[in-house]
Image (spheres, helix red, strand yellow):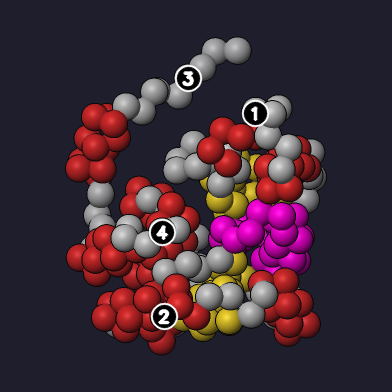
Amino acid sequence: MLKTITSMSDQLYSYMVDSWSRETDVMRELRQETSALEMSAMQISSDQAQFMAFLVKLIDARNIIEIGTFTGYSALAMALATHDECKITCCDVSEEWTSMGKRYWDKAGISHKIELKLAPAVDSLKQLLSEKKRCFDFAFIDADKANYDNYYEACLALVRPGGIIAIDNVFWGGSVVDEAQQDEDTQAIRNLNKKLKSDERIDLSIVPIGDGLTLAMKR
């Protein structure tokens, strides 16, 4: 099989970020503060945030759901890119991490766009399914991997036809192709990747950005 993806050296990656990045000062401050955390690797990169902001603006998203908010960087990027009346529903379990995001949402003047649900995402999704079925334009899944399939099915029900579900970490640091890796998270991602390939309810693409980002458009 012909490999057509250019190898991304550190030098080339720095060139890409320097040449195309439009990260705002507030976004940069949040990213830098998050980088000091022990779990900082959970934050998406600035280039992925810019790509997602581009996507939500492209489809004129007015209603977004995010599963896994961490310190609020991706929510901030999407909120800055969308109309003032856009609503972003963020689902997370950590008050500590999301409180950091709240400070920067306030600083950027977009906190009125964001509704934070502090509860297990499965429970929040069940509640939303009973209230707002098929009303979201865009969904971003970036939470505990063992529940990825549950999150995907719920988001597929919540997203309107033509809406997009973005699923993060589908390469899982390369573990998906390492047969020695048989832990629950790795197997969950492998199983979902395999499922999506033949799922006729969606149109499918994969973007080799960050740790791999799957895009599923609901038919």
Instruction: Name the element at disc 4.
Output: loop
Sequence-wise first label, 1 or 3: 3
Contact (CB < 8 A) between labels 1 and 2? no
Query: SS of the residue at dot 3?
Result: loop
- Residue 170 shows in this picture: yes
Residue 146 lies in the magenta-colored region: yes
The reply to whether callout 2 and callout 3 are in contact (CB within 8 Å) is no
The CA distance from mark 3 to mark 4 is 35 Å
Q: Tell me the residue that label 4 is attached to.
A: 38
Of discs 4 and 1, which sits in the foreground?
Answer: 4
Where residue 43 sits: x, y (%)? 43, 57
Q: Is residue 149 above or below residue 106?
A: above
What amino acid is at disc 4? Glu
Given residues 31 and 107, the one toward you in this image is 31
Q: CA distance from mark 2 to mark 3?
A: 42 Å
State the residue position of label 2: 99
Q: CA distance from mark 4 to mark 2?
A: 16 Å
Q: What residue is at 27 percent from the left and 60 percent from the top?
A: 32
Q: Which residues are magenta?
A: 139-165
Q: Is residue 11 left or right of residue 96?
A: left
Name the kind of residue labelled 1 in the image: Val
Q: CA distance from mark 1 to mark 2?
A: 36 Å
**Quadrant where the N terminus lies?**
top right
Q: CA distance from mark 4 to mark 1?
A: 26 Å
Is tag 3's residue or tag 4's residue first in the polypeptide sequence?
3
Q: Which residue is mark 3?
A: 4
**Residue at point 56%, 33% (across, down):** 174
Q: Amino acid at mark 2?
A: Ser
The residue that label 1 is drawn on is: 177
- Horizontal and vertical percent for residue 104? 31, 76
Which SS class for mark 1?
Answer: helix
**In the rendered structure, which disc, 1 or 2, sits on the residue that comes first in sequence?**
2
